[in-house]
Amino acid sequence: LQNLLSSSQQHQDLAKEVRNIISTIDMTLEAIKYKDGKLEILNQLALPEKSEYISIQSVEDAWDAIHSMKVRGAPAIAIVGCLGLLVEVLQKDFTSIDEAIKWVKESLDHLVAARPTAVNMSKAASHLRTAVQQWEFKSVQNWKARLQMEIEGMLEKDLDDNKQIGEHGADEILENFLPSEGKVSILTHCNTGSLATSGYGTALGVIRSLFSRGKIDRVYCTETRPYNQGARLTAYELVHDGIPASLICDSMAGALLAQGKVTAIITGADRVTANGDTANKIGTYQLAVLARHHNIPFYIAAPFTSIDATIPDGSHIPIEQRPAAELTHIKGSRIAAPGIEVWNPAFDVTPADLITGIITEQGVFSPHSLPL
Ligand code: MRU
């Protein structure tokens, strides 16, 4: 009887393991599905429980997806904004190119306002505003085809940039901070992976490159309260790739660093200003302070589309305030005392002096000498 019982337990364990493996294979990391004028995004509000795609057919759909954070992460926001605009342009009848340009400019203004801190959408909008004005076409059809080429190019460029960021970041860490054991442990914050970009990721791209070189001992990802991008999204990506990783609460970072468990901290950026100050997910600044105290390198990984040379320093970055319910409730259930007031900034600014280097697609730069 004992044998029978233990073998049935083994079967159950095996079945559970198989179910876990199947669910991992099912996990999709494609945040943005775009082909020939059709756009779908993975609803990141439903992750990790459900992998559900939503169709984006207009500027308004894109605005709503960005504002409600169904898609989030600085590069992904810009790509979905621009692709949403493209999808609607391709469907729309314009009587003249001037009419189309006017509509595009107004739509870009609207999209930029969906979330204020990440600069990528606003930079893409300035680029497109200038570009559409310069193209010389006689037919609306040809003008639309040119716009399509321009916007589709952004998607491809972001993926290429991320791969470059990954390689430069891995070189930097291995050349300067490889411990004698031959592997590194990286702490990261928020989600900067395939789900925040067109694919691969920025800080998570560096981690992917280190892993593909066999150099990752362990990744620590913070939960990233209040929206839990770390627990829901980064953990999901790390499990998907089979990277050895542990989830920690944001408040555990100090204890982890004090135990000497982390080789380097790498996070992403929503906006890097001319002097190297960097806005990123709330909680990044405290990690940089901790890193300095423990003499651990602190890197920002970001494409040039996240660098805003028009702003001198971090004090000028608009910081988005999110609704109180993100802090007081989890999945609709209240966790905070009713009546309590809330301060819920979505981002903070890390001063350049606390940043060891900014890892970009063009190489790693001191925050004090960005090639602007
Ligand atoms: O509020 P979110 O989830 O859009 O914040 C995202 C971040 O702060 C990321 O670190 C940043 O956008 C870089 S994504 C490559």
Image: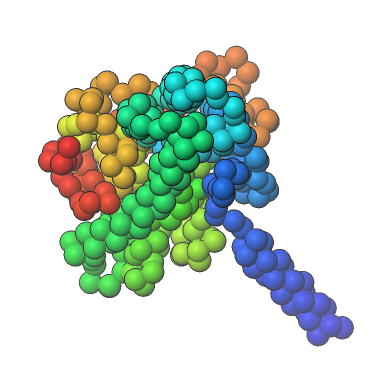
Location of the N terminus (image quadrant):
bottom right
- Pinpoint residue 154: horizontal percent, then vertical percent: 40, 44
For this rendering, which residue is in front, 173 or 5?
Answer: 173
Q: Residue at x 65, y 41 (%)?
A: 54
Q: Is residue 79 above or below residue 338?
A: below
Q: Is residue 128 left or right of residue 288?
A: right
Establish if 178 lies above or below 161. below
Whether residue 81 can be seen here: no
Q: Position of residue 264 (x, y in %)?
A: 28, 54
Asked whether the viewer can see residue 19, the reply is yes
Q: Position of residue 163 (x, y in %)?
A: 35, 58
Quadrant of residue 274 in the image? top left
Colouring of the image: rainbow
Q: Residue at x 56, y 35 (%)?
A: 90
Question: Observer-nearest residue: 363 or 182?
Answer: 363
Name the residue rendered at 60%, 44% in the picture.
38
Residue sitting farthest toward the right: 1
- In this picture, residue 90 sits left or right of residue 319: right
Give the quarter of the figure containing the C terminus.
top left
User: Farthest residue toward the left?
Assistant: 369
**Residue 92 picture location, percent across and down:** 59, 29
Is residue 182 or residue 192 the one in the foreground? 192
Front position in the image: 203 or 122:
122
Report the side of 313 relative to 248 (left or right): left
Q: Going 57% across and 43% down the picture, which residue do you hit?
A: 37
- Depicted 263 relative to depicted 134: above or below: below
Q: How many marks?
A: 0
